[in-house]
Amino acid sequence: MKLEDLTVNFEEQGVTKVRELDRALLASSSAWATIAFLFEERGPDGDFRGPKVSLRRYRKRGQGFVVEKHLTLGSPRQAHALAVALARWFPEAPGDLDVGD
């Protein structure tokens, strides 16, 4: 399994329960990868709710990756609060910043 194959998409009995909207590769090495996923979850009424953000830290094991740690930001308010804090703590981005896949 390659980094490009990692996803939060999830189906159950042919029904999509979690739909990935976007992703950003935050860091990677030969043994580790950190990816931020933007996703929606299907609610009990069948409609998608969200969006949410999942930060996932993967470790390479054998030919694939396994999730070692994860954190889900369950609301836009939490995501914006984190963005504000990070901007305050790190006001100048490094010149080689590229979070797109």
Image (cartoon, rainbow, N blue to C red):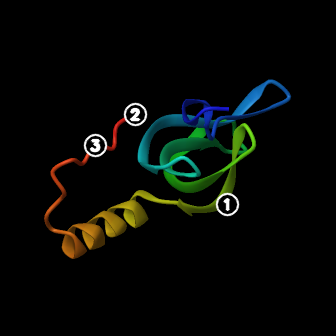
* Labels 3 and 2 touching (C-beta < 8 A): no
Would residue 13 be found to the left or right of residue 3 on screen? right
In the image, farthest residue toward the right: 13
Asked whether 53 or 101 is in front, the reply is 101
Tell me residue 80's x, y (percent): 33, 62
**Label 2 crowding class (10 Å Cα cut-off): few <14, some 14-19, many 20+?**
few
In the image, farthest residue toward the top: 14
Q: Return the residue at label 3.
A: 98
CA–CA distance in space, label 2 to label 1: 21 Å
Q: Return the residue at label 1.
A: 68
* Of pointers 2 and 1, the one earlier in the residue sequence: 1
- Residue at x 15% of width, y 68% of height: 91
- Residue at x 41% of width, y 43% of height: 24
Tell me residue 32's x, y (percent): 56, 53
Quadrant location of the N terminus in the rendered image: top right
Local secondary structure at mark 3: loop
Asked whether 67 or 41 is in front, the reply is 67
Q: Which mark is residue 101?
A: 2
Q: Which mark is residue 28?
A: none
Report which quarter residue 81 is drawn in: bottom left
The amino acid type of the residue labelled 1 equals: Glu
The amino acid type of the residue labelled 3 equals: Asp
CA–CA distance in space, label 3 to label 2: 8 Å
The amino acid type of the residue labelled 2 equals: Asp
